[in-house]
Amino acid sequence: PGSPNPTSPKPTSPVECSICFNTYDNTFKTPKLLQCSHVFCLECVARLSTGLPPNHPEDQLPCPFCRQLTSIPQEGAPALQTSKELLATLPPELQQEKVLWMEGTKLCCREPSDDPENPDSCISIDVAMSKPESPEAPPTGLAGRLSRCDMCDDWKRIVLLSALIIILFCIILWPVQCALKTGNLRCFTRTVAMT
């Protein structure tokens, strides 16, 4: 389990995440090592771990490349092992790993500030997938049945089609029906007034 699957895709660059293609750094893009030896940035790993389906064990993250499971620590994705080899390839000012933590679905980092009243400021990004917490119940009654009808979604088309059918009947089919009944195309007789 220590070596990656030889058939799994190789990272595009040793200094960028293979999911988001952003360059690694020492904050949200810290290179995190999965148990299969594949490396991804912290933000992508955190997004993957918060986006697991409800029936999936919460502490097991499948690798996006080889599908091998990685145990996610209780503290979340920031507690995963950092790839020291990749961190060493970064510029010297980015080689010192910063302290990051999870608060719900937010990935947080404390940044030193020049403001004397607020010496430490917290920067956070929301890594939750953009989906509702609970699925909405479909409407009930007539409105619910109509909303589930695919044809009823486009009511303007239905009205236009109905109007065209009525016009077609009045302009084309009525004279044809009249001609078939009477034998000529003059269904409406004109009375000429004599003066």
Image: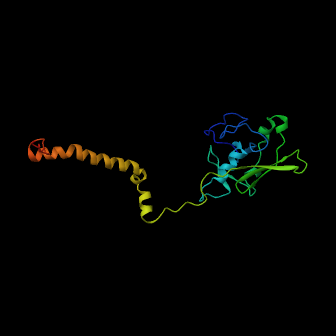
Q: Please tell me which residue lies in front, 129 or 51.
A: 129
Residue found at x 71% / y 57% = 104
Q: Image quarter for residue 56?
A: bottom right
Nearest the viewer among 144 and 187 is: 187
Asked if residue 157 lies left or right of residue 85, the reply is left
Place of residue 115 in the rendered image (x, y in percent of width and height, measured from the top left): 88, 46
Q: How is the image coloured?
A: rainbow
Quick check: 73 above or below 195? Answer: below
Q: Residue at x 20, y 45 (%)?
A: 173
Residue 120 location, x and y as percent? Answer: 86, 50
Count of labels in the image: 0
The picture places residue 57, in percent across and down from the top left corner, at 64, 58
Residue 144 screen position, x and y as percent: 45, 62
In the rendered structure, the answer to whether residue 63 lies left or right of residue 161 reads: right
Determine if residue 33 is in view: no
Q: Is residue 40 left or right of residue 132?
A: right
Quadrant into which the C terminus falls: top left
Q: Is residue 143 visible?
A: yes
Residue 165 or 126: which is nearer the viewer? 165
Q: Residue furthest front?
A: 195
Q: Give the vertical position of 119 relative to 134 (above or below).
A: above
Between 83 and 54, the one nearer to me in the picture: 54
Name the residue at 36% across, 50% down: 159
Give the residue furthest to the bottom: 141
